[in-house]
Image (cartoon, helix red, strand yellow):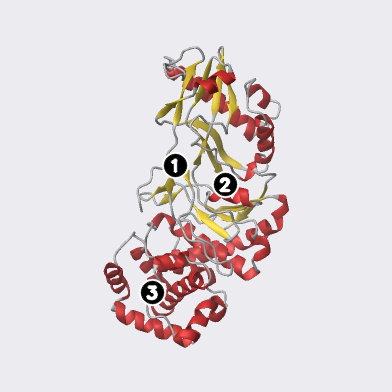
Amino acid sequence: MPASDPSSATDPTPRRPARPWERAALAGLGLAVVVVLALTGFSHTDRGADGTAGAAPADEASRTAQVQALLDTWASAVRTNDEAALPGLMDKAAAPGFLAAETRRAAHVAGVEFSDWGYEIAGGSETVVPAGLVDALGADEVWAPVVQLRYAIAGADESPTRKPVALVVARRGDRWALVSDSATADDERRTWRGPWDFGPVVSRRVDTGDGKTSVVLGHPENATMVDRLAAELPAAVVNATQLWGSRWAGRALVWVAGSQDEFTALVGPNHDGRDIAAVAISDAVDPDAATVSGQRIVFSPASAERLTDVTRRAILRHELTHVAARAETVDRSPMWVLEGYAEYAAYRGTGEPVRQIAPALTAQVGAEGAPTEFPDDTDFSGYGARGSVAYETAWSINAFVAEEYGESRLTELYRTLAVGEADPETVDGRLSDVLGVDAEQFRDRWTDWVRARLG
């Protein structure tokens, strides 16, 4: 697995191609580190020759301690829904609507059980706050430190995850106050928004076995979808554990987005939820400890209407398999094993007819014959029949291995191949080592298997 700094603020945007609605969702195995810049605070009267404010105050430690105390009070007010405390934390020139937004957030946060919620100043390189921003506020000092929201949802999160907050604070005399969490001097930083920023939150806590708790979050308007996913979660966790083994958290956090804006905020700017049903995302990965922070399965706003009972169950199981395997999965591993393994898990033990699991592949076999080669990684990003056939072909490879060699060997094959990018000869060699068969012979047997079932 690529080295990851668990302390870094991370963008959970998945790096996986979207798959067609009729099949399942994209798997978020990617990890992108967001470079967040700190902004040095400056005196209102001390200016440089370039028109920006001048040198930083001498007592950096004192300023940091004072602002951290402000952040601690802010976090407590939001977490406890202390509506009376919030106005006293705001600067007199605070951004319009900031107090109202914080008041709403606090009310919505109250609907979620957190084991941790706090704001913390993090280290980082610094850039100058423009003099125009200082002048507009008219404060003695303005500072935009690197700030992260640190939070963990009780039961579902083994450790807190951290998200960027584009905060600006100001000092008047001895008092620091909040100015904005959306105005930045460099226009690069963005405050991460969670479900509680998009409306009231409904939460369902689910016992998923061995004393572990999973959580499904959504909004009142999609509470039916939340309830359906909560009902499916215990069996989905058991399914993932039976296939993958017990070396994973055995719990999940599932979000149901209420709008395209919310879906994009949760999973990244490349996805608005129109074309995919769900995404598995993660933040920092610690490969040595085999732990992952910030793992979530996010369902798009249209999923409630467009998914059937069968496809909703399959997508949840598919994404949950990616969650289970994430700590032992390296990006750019062969897609046919990453996605095919999750697809096999999605339909494992359901009794679904193979022609219904793989309708696009069935049609291709009827028209052109059974495939003889594995799909290319680029095929999985295709729309329409190309993408569907890629996913279904990957499913068929993994289903064949499970039937011919057993599920334990299938999981061993996944672990052996999910170690990063490799040339075709290396992949074939690893396949042969695990299954004890020449790669060319394996392909011939798999082709016969597909022909027998889908021809």
Q: Nearer the viewer, residue 232 or 89?
A: 89
Q: Position of residue 276 (x, y in %)?
A: 57, 61
Read off the residue under disc 2: 265
Q: Residue at x 61, y 65 (%)?
A: 312
Q: Earlier in the sequence, mark 1 or mark 2?
A: 1
Q: Position of residue 136 (x, y in %)?
A: 58, 20
Q: Position of residue 265 (x, y in %)?
A: 57, 46
Read off the residue under disc 3: 374
Image-quadrant location for residue 59:
top left
- Amino acid type assigned to the residue bearing label 3 in the image: Phe
Q: Earlier in the sequence, mark 1 or mark 3?
A: 1
Read off the residue under disc 1: 34
Q: Residues within 10 Å of mark 2 (few under 14, many from 20)?
A: many
Q: Nearer the viewer, residue 229 or 393?
A: 393
Q: Residue at x 37, y 59 (%)?
A: 332
Q: Nearer the viewer, residue 388 or 52?
A: 52
Q: Residue at x 59, y 31 (%)?
A: 75
Q: Element under label 1? A: loop
